[in-house]
Image (spheres, rainbow, N blue to C red):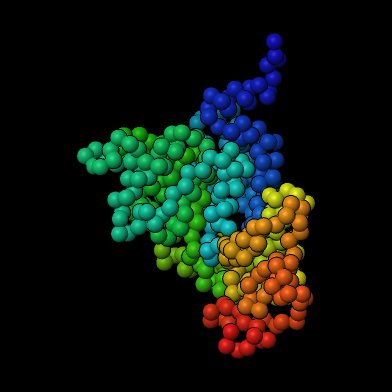
Amino acid sequence: MPALNRQFLYEAVATQAGIPQALLDTGQVAAAVEQFVTRASEYLVGQGDVLERLGCVVQSRMDERRTGWNQAVETSHANWDTRPWASVLALGPSGTGKTETARLLADGIFDGRLISLHCSEVGPESPHAVAMWTGAPPGYVGHGTGGVLTNGLRQHRTAVILFDEIEKAARGVVDHVLLPLLGEGTVTDRNTGETLWATDCVVFCTSNLGSEAHAGSTSAGPSDGNGSGEEEGEARKILSRFLRSEVVSRFHVVLTYRPLDRDGRWQLWSFLEDDLVAKVGDNARVTLDRVARNVVERRLECVGGNARGVQDLFRDQVLPLLAGREVGEHLHITADASGRLQRAGDLHAERQGGSPHDDTAWVIDSGTCRGRSRKAGRGA
């Protein structure tokens, strides 16, 4: 007969309460947070300082919660904090990893439990669409089916609640859903009138507001995880035009994400190459010759600091070159006279014995982001 030990109790409580087992043990929580920061820092290039600060906030909030629980037990008073475990507001340009951070946080700490809400669904032109989140009251279409948010909280007591692009939500939605959620940790189901608790959840809101504050800055160089003082002040000034101070003040932390610099773009490109090689799984390598690297460099400049644009460029330019590749064959990439990336062997065959490595100099038009070869002429 198995012994009744701490691990057995953790498993039993986690199963009955429907919460991840890691959240019951302080040591496991700390290890999960550290692992999340490490993994996310590798995946989200250039945002290491932001992720470190997020990890510190999540861990410190957990320590505060446990201290409150212990005091409540010792004094026999149930006066612990009912607010969400942590509430995060992530600002920054599109394509810098804000939404992906929420997904990685859910995977790393909450066993993939993510309640995703896109605020454009409840914009000023359709404020009644909030019924999609909290259920429709009696007499309205959808009554009896519940909402995405309320049904998600019933199913998962612990989860990451993602409000994507919060600036697109109608003000009434912010007042009736987000304010009580951040302040008290509660959501009212308009379908049944039931009060649902989000005390053991992390509320993660993203916004593209403040992008103007980063127009001339990138993720290069050290930072405190929340941008420089001037950038932070400018971002908050822009944010105040859309969200009132009583909303912003309820967040435990406001993070600002920065666009990628040149080194960050190439680091992400190398990460995509390594990921491709791992998926192919036949000891292949992906290499760019000098001409191809020149072309990719200029196109990465056109992409700017948007990580999503780097991923799209890699998918559109490199992945098609895998077609027809022999097992174990290395993928050597060059560029033809029109700036199109090709396998070196294919271009060599097209030139009927010519060398795929030439001294073609590439010029990228800043308006169209299209390349032209100086050997091909100005009209290319």
Q: Residue at x 57, y 77 (%)?
A: 369
Q: Residue at x 53, y 40 (%)?
A: 113
As drawn, is 283 to the left or to the right of 154?
right
Percent of width and height locating residue 249: 48, 55
Residue 219 appears in view? no
As drawn, is 157 to the left or to the right of 312?
left
Quarter occupied by the C terminus: bottom right
Percent of width and height locating residue 79: 50, 35
Instruction: Quadrant for residue 12, please give it.
Output: top right
In the rendered image, the vertical position of residue 196 relative to residue 311, given as above or below:
above
Which of 292/275 is in front?
Answer: 292
Quarter occupied by the N terminus: top right
Percent of width and height locating residue 242: 41, 63
Instruction: Quadrant for residue 270, please give it.
Output: bottom right
Q: Residue furthest left?
A: 139
Which of 241/293 is in front?
Answer: 293
Which of 126/244 is in front?
Answer: 126
Percent of width and height locating residue 332: 74, 65
Q: Residue at x 63, y 88 (%)?
A: 377
As drawn, is 223 to the left or to the right of 234?
right
